[in-house]
Image (tube, helix red, strand yellow):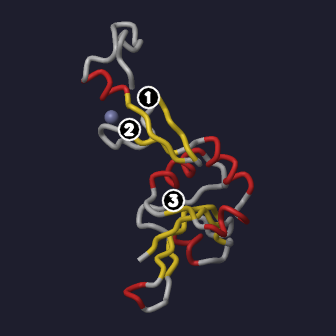
Amino acid sequence: MKITKSIGFSYPTSSNAIALGFEGFGCWHISVTCHDIEGSGQSRTFTPHNAEGFDRPDDLDLIAMFLETDGKTCEAFKTYGNPKALEAIERHPQLKCRKCEAVNPMVYLAPVVIDGAGSCICLDCADARGWIDGNGNICEGIEL
Ligand SMILES: [Zn+2]
């Protein structure tokens, strides 16, 4: 089964907007689609259980949630998605720590980004391995 994700808008009168507390306003949120469920050829799109509604498609919390959501970015969203959301995602590539798999750590070293997805070493991991000196610099002779 393939899972894709996108950022969508729910209209003010939609059940999603009501469920997310944006009745009468509408909101942006994460949508996840499961394709070909159990080989049936059917797919289902839903908002993840932890979904929240947002006023703006480029809200940084929404972008962060999107990056942490499992699944590949939906092709149609990549092409036709809201330009502000797409731009915000572009500016915040997903970085996973190569040691502990933490997603988008606050402080990191040695990022490698290819096609909007990347890896890095989070500060905790670098620190735990003694790769950082007292000033927060990488110790001499350490290659990350
Ligand atoms: Zn780490």
**Residue at left offset 31%, top offset 27%:** 124
Which label number is shown at residue 108?
1
Looking at the picture, how far across and down is residue 7, in whole percent? 60, 62
Looking at the picture, how far across and down is residue 29, in whole percent? 57, 62
Residue occupied by mark 2: 97
State which tag comes first along the sequence, 1 or 2: 2
State which tag comes first along the sequence, 1 or 3: 3
- Looking at the figure, which quarter contains the N terminus? bottom left
State which tag comes first along the sequence, 2 or 3: 3
Looking at the picture, how far across and down is residue 137, in whole percent? 41, 12
Amino acid, disc 3: Glu
Which label number is shown at residue 90?
none
Residue 67 higher or lower than 82, as above or below: above
Q: Nearer the viewer, mark 2 or mark 3?
A: 2
Residue 80 higher or lower than 15, as above or below: above
Looking at the rendered structure, the secondary structure element under dot 1 is strand
Residue occupied by mark 3: 52
Looking at the rendered structure, the secondary structure element under dot 3 is loop
**Residue at left offset 46%, top offset 63%:** 71
CB-based contact (under 8 Å), mark 1 and mark 2: yes
Tell me: is circle 2 under 8 Å from ligand 1.
yes
Amino acid, disc 1: Tyr
Place residue 82 in its image quadrant: bottom right
CB-based contact (under 8 Å), mark 1 and mark 3: no
Tell me: is circle 1 under 8 Å from ligand 1.
no
- Looking at the figure, which quarter contains the C terminus? top left
The Cα atoms of the two marked residues, 1 and 3, are separated by 27 Å
Tell me: is circle 3 under 8 Å from ligand 1.
no
